[in-house]
Image: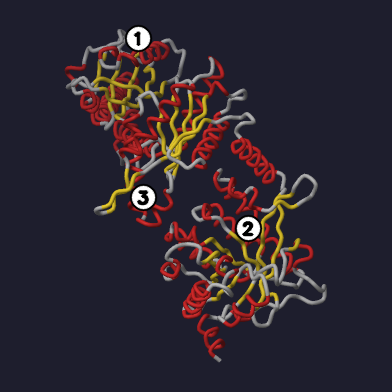
Amino acid sequence: MSEDVSTLVLLLALSGAAALAIAYRLHKRAVRRAEANLRTIFDTAPIGNAVLGSGGRIVEVNHALGHIVGFTPKELIGRTLPQLVHAEDAALLTDAVAALRAGERGGLETELRVVHASGQAVPVAVHAAALRSSPDGGTRVLLQLLDITERKRVEAHLQHMADHDPLTGLLNRRRFEQELDRHVAHAQRYGTEGAVIVLDVDRFKRVNDVYGHSTGDRVITSVARVLRRRLRTTDTLARLGGDEFAVLLPKADHREAGIVARRLVEAIRAQADVATGDRAEAVTISVGVTVLDEHADLTAEGVMMDADLAMYDAKDAGGDGFAFFAADADAPRTRTRTTWRDRIVDALANDRFALVAQPVFDATACTAVQYELLLRMTGPHGTLIPPAAFLSIAERDGLVVAIDQWVARRAIALLSEREQAGRPIRLEVNISGRSLADATLLALIASELRRTGVDPRNLIFEIPETAAVADVQLARAFAQHVQGLGCQFAIDDFGAGLGSLYYLKHLPFDVLKLDGELVEQCTKSPADRLLIESAVRVVHGLGRVAIAEQVGDADTHALLRELGVDFVQGHHLGMPLPLGSAFDPSPTQPPTLPPALALPPAVRLLQRAA
């Protein structure tokens, strides 16, 4: 029989007075046991506990709180909140405790700072609640404090990573745009002032191509170091990405902004260099400046775009200098870029791009084996504007990534339409070098292929050789990703860059497209003919396919066939046509698909040898 049951039986057997006496003693014992348990919990809790009496002084405290503030529990008894809490936070906690005592609030959860015995501020999370039953008849308050120093340190570290460029330690684009947003909002309310500078390292791509990306990183850090030394602490300096930097001069006018820009150009020219062994080459920059008080419609996005346009004006003028943004008629390049940028944005938003298709022929059989999709913009009267008019501006302003996504989506939709109609085709899609690192594009391609269920072997993604050479690792990763999806990868404009043959072993290509300049002159230039012959041998030795672009006449076609080029393309053979008429010269005659491309490289080699 348990102790409680035995006690109950005993109480029932006793008279009323004796039972009450025993019940009272049992109750007191239970209360003492509960108090002892609560005391143990209070004293040994890993978070700081303190009870404030009616006078606002500490009447009970545990060891954990003593550890947080650097005092023993005995030393803390009798102290008040203002003696422990940071001066800037004391009023907040004192007022909250008063509200708890008065029953005006049910509890408190906040973060503040207490002061350690050493004088150092310690961040803590605070929970407080009123204790209604107090020995002195008043309302006591229980405070619970948790040291959050480590959490704050981690949060600060994560915030620093989110706000700063890892290579240079400067602010990154996101944080710079936040600072500019705040400055513009302040200027809109209190009066415009300040200037923005955007600068770009001249010929930085060549540094990466010739000396490697580690040298390029050293150049970037060197430029960042010089800029940091030349600017004031009140100026905001950031690395926007790549070799592009930005500066916010919060108080500068036109004259001062020009002085700063000139000093930055001179300092970089004098102090930054490309160091490679015993040689050192000077680094120069192109700087664009825009002054905020010259903007009628002031927005952060507009300010950045204007500074960027001015920077390209400085670059077009030869670099190693600076230019101011000017929206008047005396700035034709700036005005043209602004107009084209608006037209590109409008075309993306309102589906005013179009695709045409140019056939690619088997060099021997002269049958269309696939089609290259070429981008056009729809003009005001339905005319098709070639990409030469706008693509360079789209590249510079970062809009080309959105264009590539549009083209990829339309290409896959077109493949799906053709497959559903029982007339499959193979398409080549051009991708900008700026899109190689775009995870969104790769995700879109994978998603659209899954959604439509098209045969991925009929989709070829091609990038310019110059883009591949600029970042071989990035190009390799892109190629492997699209090949992993079942698509093919092509290197376009091969022969336009330096060291072309060397890079072929580093890129997992399926198709190599010979640069049009080589092809156009091959019947007249022995050097061009030799380069084409060498490239074709390498391509065939690797079990891949070679395509010659810009074939302009029958003699060139015949020579390319003699040199072993697999496929040919050009105005002599087939002009780019709208999609509605490009694929089906005869509605009942589906295009010939090349079985060779669907075969493994080894089988293609055996066929070619036979």
Where residue 412 appears, as percent x and y from the top left, is 66, 62
Residue 248 shows in the view: yes
Q: Which residue is mark 3?
A: 216
Q: Earlier in the sequence, mark 3 or mark 1?
A: 1
Please tell me which residue is depicted at 67% across the width and 46% down the height of the picture. Answer: 348
Residue type, label 2: Ala
Q: Residue at x 65, y 49 (%)?
A: 389
Left or right of 135 on screen, residue 418: right
- Name the residue beneath numbered marker 1: 138
Q: Which mark is residue 545?
A: none
- The residue identified by callout 2 is 408
Residue situated furthest front in the rendering: 524
Q: Quadrant of the N terminus?
A: top left
Q: Residue at x 62, y 23 (%)?
A: 296
For badge 1, the amino acid type reads Gly
Q: Amino acid at mark 3?
A: Gly
Report the mark closest to the observer, 2 or 3.
Answer: 3
Instruction: Say left or right for 368 vs 180.
Output: right
- Looking at this rendering, what residue extends furthest in the top direction? 55
Q: Quadrant of the C terminus?
A: bottom right
